[in-house]
Amino acid sequence: MPRVTEETVDGVAHLARLSLTDDEKHLFARQLEEILDWAQSLQTLDTAGVPPLSQPAGASALREDSVCDGLDHDTVLEGAPDPGGGLFRVPRVIPG
């Protein structure tokens, strides 16, 4: 029995405010099931003796902090599509 059903996909789509066709629900249910199967297959890997990895090899999340000058206010606003009163103006997204 599949773990991800079209009803599950429909519920998630509802929460995300997405409208999906029946074909899309079927496709996404199958794809999500395949992803879960793949993730489950990772559980079969022998990782004995492999130390936990906190970062990709060679990557460093830490760097030296350096102080630098900030951006000039007027220069930044020159690139704004609708500057007003020295501020960035954006369209209203919440009904008022």
Image (cartoon, rainbow, N blue to C red):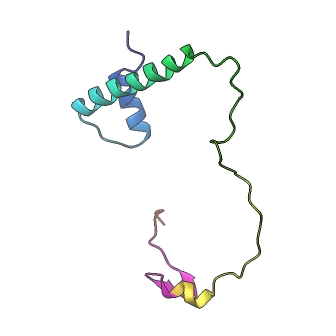
Residue 32 x %, y %: 39, 27
Asked if one can make out residue 85 in the rendered structure from this viewpoint, the answer is: no
Residue 73 x %, y %: 62, 87
Lateral position of residue 80 relative to residue 7, left or right: right
Q: Is residue 56 above or below residue 79?
A: above
1 part of magenta stretch: no
Lateral position of residue 33 relative to residue 85, left or right: left
Q: Residue at x 44, y 72 (%)?
A: 91
Q: Residue at x 43, y 81 (%)?
A: 81
Q: Is residue 83 above or below residue 59?
A: below
The number of numbered discs placed on residues in the rendered structure image is: 0
Nearest the viewer among 86 and 95 is 86
Q: Residue at x 48, y 66 (%)?
A: 96
Nearest the viewer among 71 and 28 is 71
Q: Residue at x 48, y 62 (%)?
A: 94
Asked if one can make out residue 94 in the rendered structure from this viewpoint, the answer is: yes
Q: Which residues are magenta?
A: 78-91
Lateral position of residue 59 relative to residue 17, left or right: right
Q: Is residue 18 above or below residue 64?
A: above
Quarter containing the N terminus: top left
Secondary structure mostly taken by the magenta-highlighted segment of the chain: loop
Nearest the viewer among 60 and 17 is 60
Q: Residue furthest top?
A: 1
Quarter of the rendering containing residue 56: top right
Residue 47 x %, y %: 64, 19
